[in-house]
Image (tube, grey):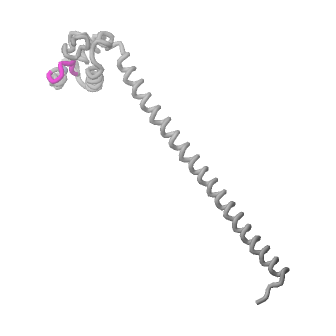
Amino acid sequence: MHFGTSSLLTYSLSYLFRAESAHSKLKIYLGSSLQNFKTSWGKIHTLLYLQHIEIKASVEKNINLVLHNFKSSQFKFLRGVVSIAALNKIVEELKRSNIVDADDITCKYILRKTHGLPCAHELAEYDRVNMPVLLDSIDSHWRKLNM
Ligand SMILES: [Zn+2]
């Protein structure tokens, strides 16, 4: 087959046109998929960020809750003197003291026996007479300054 100059030019131009068309299609495709990637990443980033904020807020809430518990006037003789671990145990026992009477033998003195800390019935008694927990009721090994 013989190509004249004009037909060769036509062929070349049409080849170039198709190539450019494919190129621009690829550019459009890559462009939009890059856009999709950016959008997806943006959404993922926002989700992670919100999750991070949520976790941070819940940790802060727990810390505030603990601090609030320790701020309670019930602990005014213990704060800064008795270890945080002991205060945490007393806070836990306080929840139980709500269902135990001051003279209740069902208390079984568990925290007193096992940890040297005021047990539910003792805490109920402090609450009944509206008195803060006394340092004397905390076994000396819980005191920070004892070391
Ligand atoms: Zn008890």
Query: In the rendered view, does 8 fall on the left or right side of 41?
Result: right
Locate residue 90: give its quadrant.
top left
Locate residue 91: give its quadrant.
top left
Image point 50% across, 35% down: which residue? 53
Q: Position of residue 92 (x, y in %)?
A: 28, 26
Quarter of the image that includes the N terminus: bottom right
Residue 146 in the magenta stretch? The answer is no
Query: In the rendered view, does 35 fall on the left or right side of 14?
Result: left
Q: Which stretch is magenta?
A: 113-119
Q: Position of residue 44 (x, y in %)?
A: 53, 47
Image point 75% across, 71% down: which residue? 16
Query: In the rendered view, does 13 fall on the left or right side of 92?
Result: right
Query: In the rendered view, does 63 fall on the left or right side of 145?
Result: right
Q: Residue pushed farthest right?
A: 6
Q: Position of residue 36 (x, y in %)?
A: 61, 54
Residue 116 in the magenta stretch? The answer is yes
Residue in the foreground of this view, choosing between 81 and 133: 81
Quarter of the image that includes the C terminus: top left
Image point 19% across, 13% down: which residue? 140
Q: Position of residue 26 (x, y in %)?
A: 67, 63
